Image (tube, rainbow, N blue to C red):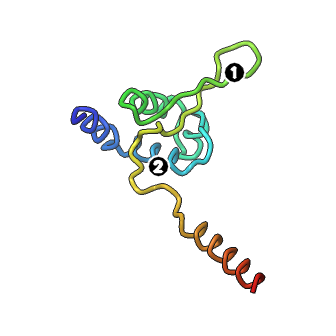
């Protein structure tokens, strides 16, 4: 377990990989190599080995998306289910505030 944590820390110690991690953490959908490269203003050939390294240490999940035509399927990356969140998950406060408002409105309507 300690070896995995060290590998993850080493992977995220690189500025480019950390930027990629943040981009994927903020995305609601898996991203292709081209998507990540475009968002960071990098070439896909620069991004590809970083994505692979992050996948090797268990930070990313990979899904192959078939295009229904000839050629290799497009790879899409997302954070692995057990990847550390680093506090990047969306805040639950807006949802809780909406729910509380709905409960208060319903209670007021019943009175």
Q: CA distance from mark 1 to mark 2?
A: 26 Å
Query: Mark 2: few, some, or many residues within 10 Å (few <14, many ≥20)?
Result: some
Label 1: state its secondary structure: loop
Residue drawn at x 43%, y 30% is 55
103 left or right of 79 in image: right
Position of 62 relative to 111 (above/below): above
Residue drawn at x 44%, y 47% is 19
Which sits in the foreground, 99 or 22?
A: 99
87 left or right of 72 in image: left
Q: Position of residue 110 (x, y in %)?
A: 76, 82
81 left or right of 33 in image: left
Q: Position of residue 53 (x, y in %)?
A: 39, 29
Q: Position of residue 49 (x, y in %)?
A: 43, 28
Position of 21 relative to 95 (above/below): above
- Which residue lies most toward the left here? 2
Which sits in the foreground, 108 or 53?
A: 108
Q: Quadrant of residue 44?
A: top right
- Which residue lies most toward the top here? 70
- The disc at residue 41 is none
Q: What is the quadrant of the C terminus in the image?
A: bottom right
- The disc at residue 22 is 2
Q: How many marks?
A: 2
Which sits in the foreground, 35 or 41?
A: 35
Q: What is the quadrant of the N terminus in the image?
A: top left
Which sits in the foreground, 31 or 111?
A: 111
Q: Which residue is mark 1?
A: 66
Q: Position of residue 76 (x, y in %)?
A: 59, 31
Residue drawn at x 64%, y 16% is 72
């Amino acid at each position: 377990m300690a070896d995995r944590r060290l590998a993850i820390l080493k992977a995220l110690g690189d500025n480019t990989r950390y930027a990629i991690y943040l981009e994927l953490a903020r995305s609601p959908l898996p991203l292709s190599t081209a998507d990540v490269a475009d968002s960071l203003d990098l070439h896909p050939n620069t991004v590809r080995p970083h994505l692979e390294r992050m996948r090797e240490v268990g930070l990313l999940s990979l899904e192959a998306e078939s295009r229904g035509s000839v050629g290799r399927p497009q790879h899409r990356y997302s954070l692995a289910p057990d990847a550390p969140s680093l506090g990047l998950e969306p805040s639950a406060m807006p949802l809780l505030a909406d729910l509380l408002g709905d409960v208060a409105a319903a209670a007021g309507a019943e009175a």
